[in-house]
Image: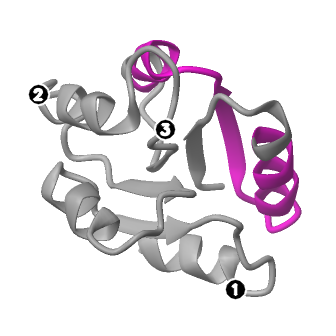
Amino acid sequence: MPQVLYIEDDPNNRLLVQRILMASDIDVALAENAAEGIEKAIADPPDLILMDISMPGMDGLTATNKIRSIPEIAHIPIIALTANVMQGDKERTLAAGCDGYIGKPINVDTFVDEIIAYLR
């Protein structure tokens, strides 16, 4: 079963994504902030990281840069899952080291397929 780590400060978003992915036999670990997410990624490296960009404290772009600097986990694909959907936001997230970008609110009809595509 593939494992996804979802780093997200909003508990409702964490629960929604966890339920959607687990219904498709994708294991989901959760972290409520970037520092916790980095610790979890080091302790139990997932197959994919879903990263919220706008979080208090360390934001998702800073966390992505930090993950990319840690050799043991630098290879893990990171997908930005964010409400930042203005022009230029996608380019900024990809330039910061994210491998992909999914805007919020998520489309529940296509979300699992998008995640599975990134897991391949």
Q: Circle 3: is it few (<14), some (14-19), or many (20+) Cα within 10 Å?
A: some
Foreground tag (3 vs 2)? 3
Q: How far apart are marks 1 and 2 (CA)?
A: 31 Å
- 65 drawn magenta: no
The outermost residue toward the front is: 86
- 29 drawn magenta: yes
Q: Is the magenta stretch mostly helix, strand or loop?
A: helix
Image vertical order of residue 73 relative to residue 36, above or below: below
Residue underneath mark 2: 69
What residue is drawn where x is 56% and y is 79%?
A: 114
Residue underneath mark 1: 110
Q: How far apart are marks 1 and 3 (CA)?
A: 23 Å
**Image spot of residue 52 (x, y percent):** 52, 43
The amino acid marked with disc number 2 is Ser
Q: How many marks?
A: 3
Foreground tag (1 vs 3)? 3
Tell me the quarter of the picture where residue 89 sits: bottom left
Q: In this view, does 58 lie to the left or right of 12?
A: left
Q: Distance between the residues labelled 3 and 2?
A: 20 Å
Q: In this view, does 70 lie to the left or right of 111?
A: left
Identify the mark nearer the N-term, 3 or 2: 3
The amino acid marked with disc number 1 is Thr
Tell me the quarter of the picture where residue 23 sits: bottom right
Residue underneath mark 3: 54
The amino acid marked with disc number 3 is Ser
Q: In this view, does 102 lie to the left or right of 65?
A: right
Q: Is residue 71 left or right of residue 105?
A: left
What segment carries the magenta color? 14-41
In the rendered view of the protein, which quadrant contains the N terminus? bottom right
Tell me the quarter of the picture where residue 68 sits: top left
Image vertical order of residue 107 relative to residue 36, above or below: below
